[in-house]
Amino acid sequence: MRVEEWMVKNPITVTKDQTIQECVDLMKGHSIRHLPVVENKKLSGLVTESNLREVFLASMIEDLKLEDVMIKDPITITPDTEIEDAAKIIYRHKIGGLPVIDNDDHVVGIITVADLVAAFIELMGLLKSSSRIDVILGEEPEAFETVSRLIRSHGGEIISVGISEHRLRRKRIYFFRLKKAEVRHIVGALEEAGFEVVSSIA
């Protein structure tokens, strides 16, 4: 999935000559936490709720300009960036959102943590009626294909697969999310084939 499918298109923007109070009012009025700062239609900075919270009181007694508090040269992505890459950037830099720009540096969107969560919920099928089987596959190179085939041959239809490291065992657990099904027979077949089923949810 690409960012353009999940970003907020044509986000509200501000210019450097707007006041901090105006930005605060915009954020409150539209329930947003990020405002791209544009100049001649091109991105020149980013102001966030946390930026404004830090300087709001000071701005009431000092002559602070938006240019003084905005993030200059913020990290950006393009509409064709993969959603997984956007998530990695946000996680790595511990930020709440990313301006999305086109080849001319025009702001065409913004994507936030909330948008990414929505994308991954859709990707993983979490809101669909579903079942789940968590399996440790082991080291065999064909293990994933074998488990997938066993699930399908026993009536399971795979919606998505997630992977995580087991905190204690230091082994990879594969989370197979299936269309709602009775999973006892599938679990039995997997265990009979030598795979360790960590848990299952019907």
Image: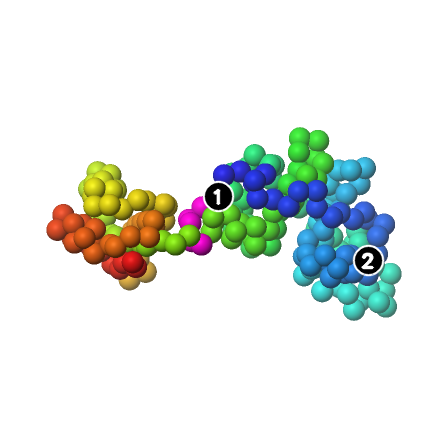
Per the image, the residue denoted by label 1 is 84
**Percent coordinates x, y for residue 78 in the rendering:** 61, 36
Category of crowding for the residue at label 1, using alpha-carbon neighbours closer than 10 angstroms: few (below 14), some (14–19), many (at least 20): some
Instruction: Name which residue lies at 30% across and 44% down.
Output: 157
The amino acid on which the numbered mark 2 sits, given as a three-letter code, is: Glu
Residue 124: say if magenta: yes
Per the image, the residue denoted by label 2 is 22
Dot 1: what SS? helix
Any part of residue 97 in sight: yes
In space, the residues marked 2 and 1 are separated at their CA atoms by 34 Å
For the record, the magenta segment spans 123-127
**Percent coordinates x, y for residue 86 in the rendering:** 54, 44
Any part of residue 72 in sight: no
In the current view of this chain or complex, which residue is farthest to the left?
A: 192
Colouring rule applied to residues: rainbow
**Percent coordinates x, y for residue 154 in the rendering:** 21, 46
The amino acid on which the numbered mark 1 sits, given as a three-letter code, is: Glu
Instruction: Name which residue lies at 81% across and 37% down.
Output: 40
- Return the residue nearer the eye: 56 or 27: 27
Instruction: Name which residue lies at 77% across and 43% down.
Output: 38
Q: Earlier in the sequence, mark 2 or mark 1?
A: 2
Image quarter for residue 183? bottom left
- Return the residue nearer the eye: 80 or 169: 80
Majority secondary structure in the magenta region: loop
79, above or below 189, in the image: above
- Return the residue nearer the eye: 90 or 143: 143
